[in-house]
Amino acid sequence: MKKLMIPALAVLVAALAGCVQVKMATDIAKDGSGTYTMTYSVSQEVEQTINEMRALGGDMAEEMDEAPDFSDFDRDDFTKKIGKHGVKLVSFANDIRDGRRTVELKLSYPDLTSLSEAIGGSFGGGGMKITKNGAGDYVLSSYQVQEDEEAATGKDAAPEDMNAAMQNAAKSMELMGRLMAHISEMSMAIAITLPGDVVESNAHRVEGRTCIWEINANNMMQAEGMEPRVVFSGKGLSIKAAE
């Protein structure tokens, strides 16, 4: 199985090439535990195109390798990996619906850092952590999770000759054209529900204690480089702050 990402806007926007639909929701309880749910949908044509781009190798393959690949998802292996961090797989569905691969995933976690290490650490990518500021409020922010040794192990690709490089470049352009034809499909929504009142955030909108970021084909360029950040009240909470 390829990489499954924890919510990191810049990474996902760049990796998914504007051709998938993703909804992620993180609910945080007063003690810092909670649930994480994700719904991922991609047309079979786009999924095949991304896999072909991975197979080409080179820089384009590295970009596509950041996108989740559920075509060969091993549920038992995934459950074992996240279990090392105290994270549990509550439910999982992976099937083809109306010509689209649709994945529905729900996890429970003891704390946000454990969730990030379980998913981001196992497959590479970004994570989220909660720290505390001088005013006694909590700060939710993004950070880069280190890949585990197993996931990081690999061999460098052999150098290509000039003809092969030119052929790959032409093929990459063709495949990228296929992806761009589906650019209007791109949509991503990230919702984070906090256990305390929101003091400030960079979310696109806030509904009560839920901060929501929405990315689509129209605003994806403006969203590049943006990571979720929220400051919320620590009143009545007992969350252990990350270092």
Image (cartoon, rainbow, N blue to C red):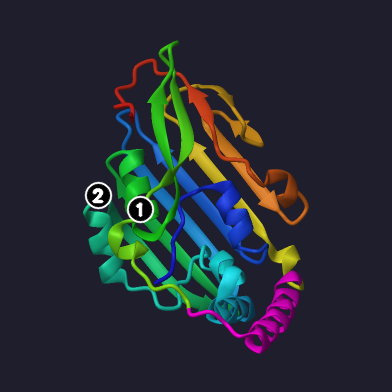
Q: Residue at x 51, y 51 (%)?
A: 24
Which residue type carries mark 1?
Gly
Rendered view: 43 above or below 191: below
Query: Dot 2, crowdedness within 10 Å: few (<14), some or many (≥20)?
Result: some
Dominant secondary structure (helix, strand or loop) of the stretch shown in magenta: helix
Q: Position of residue 155 (x, y in %)?
A: 39, 73
Q: Where is residue 239 in the image (x, y as percent from the top left)?
A: 31, 26
**Magenta residues, start to end:** 158-180
* Secondary-structure class at tag 1: helix
Q: Magenta segment: does it hold 171?
A: yes
Q: Magenta segment: does it hold 73?
A: no
Real-space CA distance between mark 2 and mark 1, rounded to the nearest whole angstrom: 10 Å
- In screen coordinates, is 239 left or right of 163? left
Q: Do the residues labelled 2 and 1 touch (CB within 8 Å)?
A: yes
Q: Which residue is drawn at 27% across and 69% down?
A: 77
Residue that numbered label 2 is attached to: 85
**Lower position in the chain sequence, tag 2 or tag 1:** 2
Q: In which quarter of the image is residue 132?
A: top left
Rendered view: 91 above or below 33: below
Which residue type carries mark 2?
His
Q: Which of 61 and 76 is in front in this view?
A: 61
Residue that numbered label 1 is attached to: 121
Q: Where is residue 66 in the image (x, y as percent from the top left)?
A: 52, 63
Quarter that holds the N terminus:
bottom left
Rendered view: 187 above or below 86: below
Q: Residue at x 45, y 10 (%)?
A: 135
Q: Nearer the viewer, residue 189 or 56?
A: 56
Q: Nearer the viewer, residue 146 or 93?
A: 146
